[in-house]
Image (spheres, grey):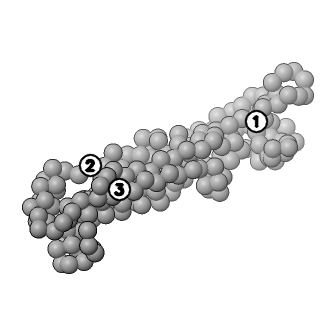
């Protein structure tokens, strides 16, 4: 969660007292810049922590952005989506019919987890890692990894991202105050 300090609120209120909705414009613009940074950096940082396929992550991720305004000084980015197939992470073997044991690694730097009864195959719903549900050939079930929301919500991803966005918002508050005091930024 990104927070604006009481000192910043007090300072903006004092400096921009003569400008209609001056402090609200400062905070809304600064928060919106932070929301924009969070949106662009979240998936980038996720790809640095996880071995996920870039295009698969982007295709199965839904981002919802709510920007701040002078009337509502709250902005957020939310991530949703379905779980990605395990095959979209680092999996060996990558081709079907090798007879080798399937291993999957979700996080970079982590060890690969072996799947004793799994196999790689190209089925109706695409190439993937599957497991038989019974002793017979069918039915099978595709093994799934994590969703975008689960990966973005990981502390390794969120802590660095939150720190970066907080720093940006703090810088932008000063920048926006100077901008409005110098006569830029439009009318309220």
Q: Is residue 67 above or below residue 134?
A: below
Q: Earlier in the sequence, mark 1 or mark 2?
A: 2
Front tag of 1 and 3: 3
Q: Residue at x 20, y 78 (%)?
A: 183
Mark 3 neighbour density, 10 Å: few (under 14) some (14–19) many (20 or more)? many
Residue 147 visible to an observer of this rendering: yes
Point out residue 177 in the picture as x, y percentages from the top left corner.
20, 68
Residue for point 18% across, 66% down:
20
Furthest residue toward right? 137
Out of 39 and 119, give the one closest to the viewer.
39
Quarter holding the C terminus is bottom left
Q: Is residue 160 above or below residue 40?
A: above
CB-based contact (under 8 Å), mark 1 and mark 3: no
Taking depth in this image into account, of 17 and 34 the one nearest to the observer is: 17
Q: Return the x and y of residue 158 as percentages of the image width and height.
A: 41, 46
Query: Which of the two discs, 3 and 2, sits closer to the camera?
Result: 3
Using the rendered view, name the quadrant where residue 112 is placed: top right
Q: Pick out the residue farthest to the bottom.
A: 183
Toward the top, the furthest residue is 135
Q: Which mark is residue 68?
A: 3
> Can you say which quadrant of the picture contains the N terminus?
top left
Residue 38 location, quadrant: bottom left
- Residue pictured at 21% horizontal, 63% vertical: 21
Point 63% across, 41% down: residue: 82
Q: Which residue matches tag 1?
A: 142
For disc 2, the marked residue is 3
Q: Is residue 5 left or right of residue 100?
A: left
Mark 1 or mark 2, whichever is nearer to me: 2
Whether residues under marks 3 and 2 lie with C-beta atoms below 8 angstroms apart, the answer is no
The spot of residue 165 in percent (x, y) is 34, 56
Q: Are marks 1 and 2 in contact (CB under 8 Å)?
A: no
């Amino acid at each position: 969660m990104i927070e604006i300090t009481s000192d910043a609120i007090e300072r903006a209120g004092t400096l921009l007292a003569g400008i209609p909705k001056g402090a609200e414009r400062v905070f809304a613009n600064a928060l919106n810049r932070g929301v924009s940074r969070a949106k662009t950096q979240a998936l980038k940082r996720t790809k640095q922590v996880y071995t996920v396929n870039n295009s698969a992550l982007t295709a199965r991720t839904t981002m919802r952005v709510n920007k701040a305004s002078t009337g509502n000084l709250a902005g957020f980015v939310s991530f949703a989506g379905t779980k990605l197939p395990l095959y979209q992470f680092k999996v060996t073997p990558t081709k079907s019919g090798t007879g080798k044991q399937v291993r999957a690694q979700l996080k970079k730097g982590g060890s690969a987890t072996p799947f004793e009864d799994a196999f790689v195959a190209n089925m109706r719903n695409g190439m993937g890692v599957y497991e038989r549900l019974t002793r017979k050939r069918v039915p099978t079930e595709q093994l799934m990894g994590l969703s975008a929301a689960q990966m973005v919500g990981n502390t390794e991803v969120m802590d660095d991202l939150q720190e970066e966005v907080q720093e940006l918002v703090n810088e932008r508050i000063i920048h926006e105050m100077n901008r409005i005091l110098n006569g830029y930024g439009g009318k309220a």
